[in-house]
Image (cartoon, grey):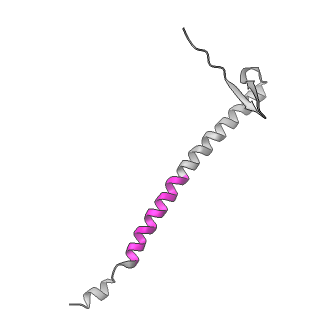
Amino acid sequence: MTEETTNTVTFEDKEYNVADLSERGQALVGLIRSVREESAGLQTRLAVLQAAEITFSKELEGVFNEPDQEELEGMD
């Protein structure tokens, strides 16, 4: 026994069967889904980049807080 899943889309609180839409309507549903997937991927990528920026900034802070090499050489 196989389960048939209906491909539907909800628009303004009303559910539509995508197969019942015009060719243009089906294409638009596909485009919207594609844009949403791309947006989700970009949001994930942005989160990774922001985390990297924080990590690099903390590392740079450590560099700024290190004693200068010239100061260390003068302590001989």
Q: Quadrant of residue 35?
A: top right
Q: Nearer the viewer, residue 35 or 10?
A: 10
With 54 as the anchor, is 19 left or right in this view?
Answer: right
Q: Is residue 32 above or below residue 60?
A: above
The quadrant the N terminus occupies is top right
Residue 48 to residue 76: above or below: above
Quadrant in the rendering for residue 39: top right
Point 67% across, 23% down: residue: 7
The image shows residue 11, relative to residue 20, as above or below, that is below
Task: Report the predominant secondary structure element of the magenta stretch.
Answer: helix
Q: In screen coordinates, is 21 left or right of 36?
A: right
For image coordinates 40% across by 78% down, the residue present is 64
Q: Residue at x 55, y 53 (%)?
A: 46
Q: Is residue 50 magenta?
A: yes
- Residue 53 location (% of width, % of height): 49, 62
Q: Residue furthest left?
A: 76
Query: Is 73 inside the magenta-drawn segment?
Result: no
Expressed as whole percent of the image width and height from the top left, the position of residue 55 reads 43, 63
At which x and y percent is residue 3?
Answer: 58, 14
Q: Name, please, the residue furthest toward the front.
A: 13
Q: Residue furthest top?
A: 1
Specify start and end residues of the magenta stretch as a single range. 46-64
Q: How many marks?
A: 0
